[in-house]
Amino acid sequence: MPNMQNDPLVIAGTEYQSRLLTGTGKYKDLEETRAATEAAGAEIVTIAIRRSNIGQNPDEPNLLEVLPPDRYTILPNTAGCFTAEDAVRTCKLARELLDGHNLVKLEVLGDEKTLYPDVTATLEAAETLIKDGFQVMVYTSDDPIIAKRLEEMGCVAVMPLAAPIGSGLGIQNRYNIIEIVENANVPILVDAGVGTASDAAIAMEMGCDGVLMNTAIAAAKDPVLMASAMKKAIEAGREAYRAGRMPRKRYASASSPLEGTFF
Amino acid sequence: MEIIVNGESRQVTEGYTAARLVEELGLSGRRIAMEVNREIVPRSDYERHVFDDGDRVELVHAIGGG
């Protein structure tokens, strides 16, 4: 068999076997989070940083007990940040929380209706974070020029949206994603907007290095089964990309030989 | 004196430390991070970090998110 196993995703010098990165939000409970994460085969999982609930069940199980940092690469996000300053604060708190771990997912959002990235604030935050020694995986729009600029600034991965966060619409602008992938020297991961397995497979077939998703799994009727479907879709899409698809033709081309017919 | 912890006012005595706050909130040994007036206070400094009147303290932890 051709080399099917050794095809790692390399982010900031670390190799990962899984190209499916998952979020940990919107699940029914921590057990479902754990089971879906495991079914997805994810090695990198995003988390959010929020105020500790003071005086409320201090003994309730903690997300990082279910997804221990010695087993998973924890990727703190800056979800909910609408300014560069808040995003930078969040990353610094995350680094302290995770004992100096400096890989972060930067997102700075523009408005609550679209959750579309505020690109200028994202650039500003990325610059500050990189100077401060963070390894930044950056969520951004599907603009090829901005994606390149973020790469040149030193982001370790660029993560354009497929469609708005939580929309499940699938890749809305395939040609932009292809343009970004073709010009990139860092991993390009589609982040946000995937709805079902075929969306993930399409992203991978286009040459994306990975996909980060949350709602597509967590909001499925059976999240654990969808996590399993996504794992297969990512693997299938990646193999199809590496295999190189046949050219598209306008007319038919018989699969059975036309010679030797007896009729 | 008064400090603000996660947006809520808290009356504390002079010399009140970060370690004492964490303990009184039942958060000892939990994986948390602390920011005071927008600056990180490392866990290793909790014992010696003494609050001033009006300090704004944020205590955060990890939760599910995408």
Image (spheres, coloured by chain):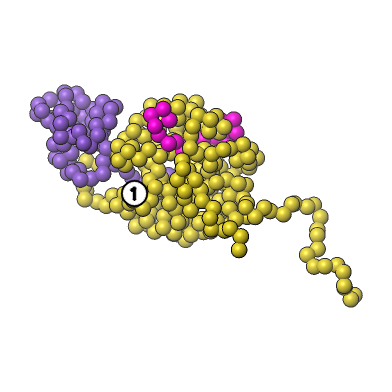
Chain colours: A yellow, B purple
Residue, disc 1: A69
Decide which of A14, A34 is in the foreground and name it: A14
Report whether A38 appears left or right of A148. Answer: left
**Residue A218 in view of the camera:** no
Report whether B63 appears left or right of A8. Answer: left
Residue A82, x across and y down, in percent:
42, 30
* Residue B8 position (above or below residue A5): above
Residue A111, x across and y down, in percent:
46, 31
Residue A49, x across and y down, in percent:
34, 39
Decide which of A15, B3 is in the foreground and name it: A15
| Residue positioned 38% across, 46% down in the render | A74
Residue at the far right: name it: A263
Which corner quadrant holds the C terminus of chain A?
bottom right
Report whether A144 appears left or right of A113. Answer: right
Residue A184, x across and y down, in percent:
58, 37
* Residue A20 position (above or below residue B34): below
Amino acid marked by disc 1: Pro
Write down the region rendered in magenta: A130-146
Which corner quadrant holds the N terminus of chain A?
bottom right
* Residue A138 position (above or below residue A38): above
Dot 1 alpha-carbon crowd within 10 angstroms: few under 14, some 14 to 19, many 20 or more: some
Q: Which quarter of the figure has residue B39? A: top left
Label 1 resides on the chain identified as A
A1 in magenta? no
**Residue A229 in view of the camera:** yes
Q: Secondary structure at mark 1?
A: loop
Residue at the far top: name it: B53
| Residue positioned 81% across, 63% down in the render | A254
Residue at the far bottom: name it: A262
A138 in magenta? yes
| Residue positioned 38% across, 29% down in the render | A132
